[in-house]
Structure formats: C-alpha cells, structure tokens
Amino acid sequence: MTATTREGVFHFFALARELRDLIYEELVTATAPVKVTRTWSPKLRARAHKLPAANMLLLSPRFSAEYRSIVQKKTTLVVEDHFSDSARLQNIPIQLPRSVSGIRLILLEVYICPANALATCEGKETDCCTIGQDVALHMRWISDLLARLPQLTSLTINVHTPFRFGVAENRSALVKHVSAIATLPKLAAITMIVNDGVGHKDVNRWEYGCVEKEEIMKWERTTGEFRDVEA
C-alpha cells in the first residue's frame, strides 16, 4: 500500500537537485569565532563566516548533507593580524583547529608600517625598510597558514596602513615590497587600504572595519598588476 499524500504538504525533495541547491544558497548561515594562534604572538583574531547554521543541520540527514555541501563552498575564514611591531621573533608556526582545516576561502586583514614608524621607504632593500620588514614577516606566517589548508581555492588579502604614501617615491616603494605578496599560492586579490583604524599604538584598539578608510590600490590575478583605485 502506498502512503497517502497529505493535502497541502510541500515535498521539498520532489524538486530537482538544481532547484534545491539554489534554495540552499539562500538559507541562513552562521558566523563563529575560530582560535588561530601563533606561538610568538597571540594577537590573531579569526572568525568563520557563512558556516552551516546549526538549526538547518537538524532538519533531516538528507537535507543536512545537501545543505552543508553547498554552504561549505562559501565558508570563509577571516583572520585579522594584530601583532606588535616589536614582536619580530623567529618562531612563526601557526596553530589551526582541525575544524577549519578543510576551508576553501580565506580573507586576511593585515597591516604594514605601524603608527610609530616612519612611512618613508625610498626604495630601500627589504631589510632596511619598515614596509619590507612587515611584508617579509607576513609572508612567513601566511605561508605557514596556507600550508595547513590543503583544500584552499581562493585567498584574498587586505593590506591596511595608517599612511597615505602621497609621495611618488614612497608609493613606488610600497608597490615594490607589497608585490612580494602576489607570489602566494591561490591568491585572487590584494587591496591596499588607508585605514585610521590601525593607527593606534595600542593594537587592541585596532579596527579593520573602520568606517573612515579608503582603498587606494588593488592587485588582481586577472591583471597581474597594481592599479590605483579611482575615488
């Protein structure tokens, strides 16, 4: 005997899988803190965005599996670096929880040239320039982080500074040193941002999401070069 279909009941799984996937993409997701640490500096703040929402995973095993498979493609780990300028130690390795080891998308919010350092660079070599030193240090810990994410498909980096680099020579040096970041694997884009929110000497007060910020340059994989952002 076949089961009687109740009047007014919508049979979700009667829809084509393509339609179900479109619905999954519009459903609620979650955001949660993630503990990402460095042995030499605890000042990393991380959150996972667009995680599968817990209440969606309780509906049914089939729904949960399909929903999770779609949402996890967009789950993004956002890491903010708040290291102190004085913390230039040699011990770089990152500690990453297993729960995010399969993540595919990464957004890094990093800074160069802290508020207590001069913004001048004048094209000097990496070890003589604050910009170059900061980029070199970022390259080390970011490379270690990426090595722990074997399923990574896309990396985006926002580079923040409290200085405008209005002098042409300094701007040229800025591009020269930050270009090293473009060699990182899976990199999709780099955006240079003037941000007063990272101008505090107290790094605990830094705010990467500060309203008073301005994108000044952008590098994209498709073009392979830095271009000024039009105001």
Image (cartoon, helix red, strand yellow):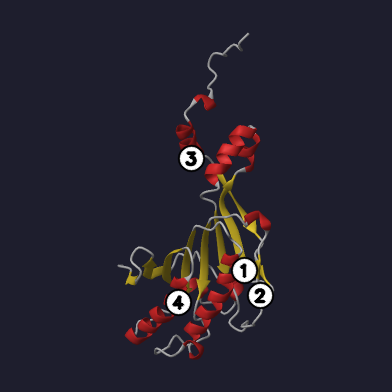
- Helix, strand or loop under label 3: helix
Spatial separation of the CA atoms under disc 3 and disc 2:
38 Å
The mark lying in front, picked from 4 and 3, is: 4
List the residue tagged with mark 4: 180
List the residue tagged with mark 2: 41
Three-letter residue code for mark 4: Ala
List the residue tagged with mark 3: 26
The answer to the question of whether label 2 and label 1 lie on touching residues, with beta carbons closer than 8 A, is yes
Give the image location of residue 21, x and y in percent: 48, 37
Give the image location of residue 68, x and y in percent: 58, 42
Spatial separation of the CA atoms under disc 2 and disc 1:
8 Å
Give the image location of residue 39, x and y in percent: 69, 73
- Helix, strand or loop under label 4: helix
As drawn, is 103 to the left or to the right of 215? Answer: right
List the residue tagged with mark 1: 44
Residue appearing at x 53%, y 68% in the figure: 207
- Which label's residue is closer to the chain start, 4 or 3? 3
Give the image location of residue 199, x and y in percent: 51, 77
Q: Is residue 2 positioned above or below 56 on the image?
A: above
- Which label's residue is closer to the chain start, 1 or 4? 1
Residue appearing at x 54%, y 13% in the figure: 7
Q: Residue furthest top?
A: 1
Three-letter residue code for mark 2: Ser
Closer-to-camera residue (127/87): 127
